[in-house]
Image (tube, rainbow, N blue to C red):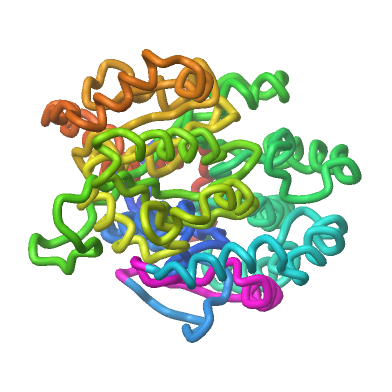
Amino acid sequence: MIVLYLGRPKYQFGYLPIRNLTMRILILAYSYSPALTPRAFRWTAVAEWMASEGHDVEVVCAKSNGLSGFQVIKGVQIHRVGGGFRNTLKAWMNLEQVVKPKPNKAMVKQALSKRSSSLVRKLYSFTLKNVMWPDFAAFWYFSAFRKSKELIKNKPYDAIISVSIPFTGHLVGLSLNKRYMIPWLVDIGDPFYFMTETPVNNHKFFGKLNFYSEERVLEKADVISVTTKQTRLEYYKHFPYLDANKISVIPPLFVTPDLQKGSKQLFTGQRKLKLVYAGTLYSRIRSPAVLLKFFASLLDEPIGEKAELHFFGEINDCASCFQEYAHLIGEKIFLHGLVMRDDALQAMKEAEILINLGNQTGYQLPSKVIEYVMLGKPVLNISPLPLDNSENLFEGINSILSVTEDSLSRDLEAYAEVRNFIEAPPPVSPDVIARFSEIHGLQKIGQNYIELLEEKISREPVLKNLAI
């Protein structure tokens, strides 16, 4: 009896893994391009990079209006399934309307009114959000699981990667792991069980189920990736019995934007001092209240005559923060809403100062922070905590000024320091950009994922017995 290997040459004699060979990878990511979410940006770039490296990559994601159920884009085979219920909800609640980069005053006031009084939004918050589990993508589970089973029957995958948010993707991965035992990497954008500041479901009712389900995912996963060391520590705090080497840190990704020098400018007007914030606002973890109060005071200074404050992204439940400054909307404060990523990057590129609002949750890092640094712009970092992830990241960079919300609100010296920084910000060092590029570039981040799959996931050799 002679045993012959008839699969791809993945193993040397003795079944030791050979490095840097191609793999068949199935990615479960609810959000994928053209969705305007941080995880869609990250995993679209990573999946396309993996395909460019010769890996066989397929993605199961949610349907997108106007796009085919199956596409091949830059070598990635994309299967768009389900998500119809979510798309209908978004349309009803105007959750993801992309607006022009320069809205007028009437448009902004109308948007504020809709966000503060939408009957549909309130009905969703008090009914469906309280009874749906695990999150808004609950119904996507069934179509994603069916499509994944269909794909697995036709192709022996070497690995499955599930992506959150939403957490539903990990439940699809858990079911597939139980059924097929395919090596499984769990990539976590935001925590599920202990992320109570911006809950995705009714934590009072589903708290124990949230804990049990995330515990099962963490236990069954072959390897887990998070974006910060603090998040990793937080997971071990809540799940101390996990293998100490199971959770790895793969930092935030920066994909170099294709912004040409001749690109159309978003801002008009001469001698304006443009302060730009790009990201999503949440009243409980990332509120603009202190920033708005500071900016209103800045308008009384000589510098205020040319200062403008621009917000790009959803304001969610922070509409009330802007009501006090309604007279400045469209004149000094501009709410652009959700825009295409290239428009947001162009706005950052044209800004004089970029604003970062740190998270109330110290273990999280806003995804745009890396983009701020890589674009070579001075950054004003306003944090609700004495030391948050953003400040850790910015430590030692003189073109970034970090200040706490409390000191900016109460300390005249801190106020003066911030004002002076805005008037005359120091230049960004090329060495800083080079260092960040090495850590957060697509090549490095993509290779980090491949190394996790190669080093930490044990793959059984595909053998077949043949009598000769």
Q: Position of residue 228 (x, y in %)?
A: 48, 29
Q: Position of residue 450 (x, y in %)?
A: 38, 43
The residue positioned 25% from the left and 37% from the top of the image is: 303
Residue 128: quadrant of the picture: bottom right
The residue positioned 29% from the left and 40% from the top of the image is: 304
* In-image side of 114 versus 18 (left or right): right
* In-image side of 134 versus 184 (left or right): right
Residue 5: quadrant of the picture: bottom left
Q: Is residue 32 above or below residue 78?
A: above
Residue 410 visible (yes or no): yes
Instruction: Say which of 278 and 17 sits in front.
Output: 278
**Magenta span includes 133:** no
Residue 455 visible (yes or no): no
* In-image side of 107 versus 398 (left or right): right
Q: Is residue 269 above or below residue 398?
A: below
Q: Position of residue 224 (x, y in %)?
A: 56, 36
**Magenta span includes 99:** yes
Instruction: Say which of 397 and 184 sits in front.
Output: 397
Q: Which residues are magenta?
A: 74-102
Q: Position of residue 173 (x, y in %)?
A: 65, 53
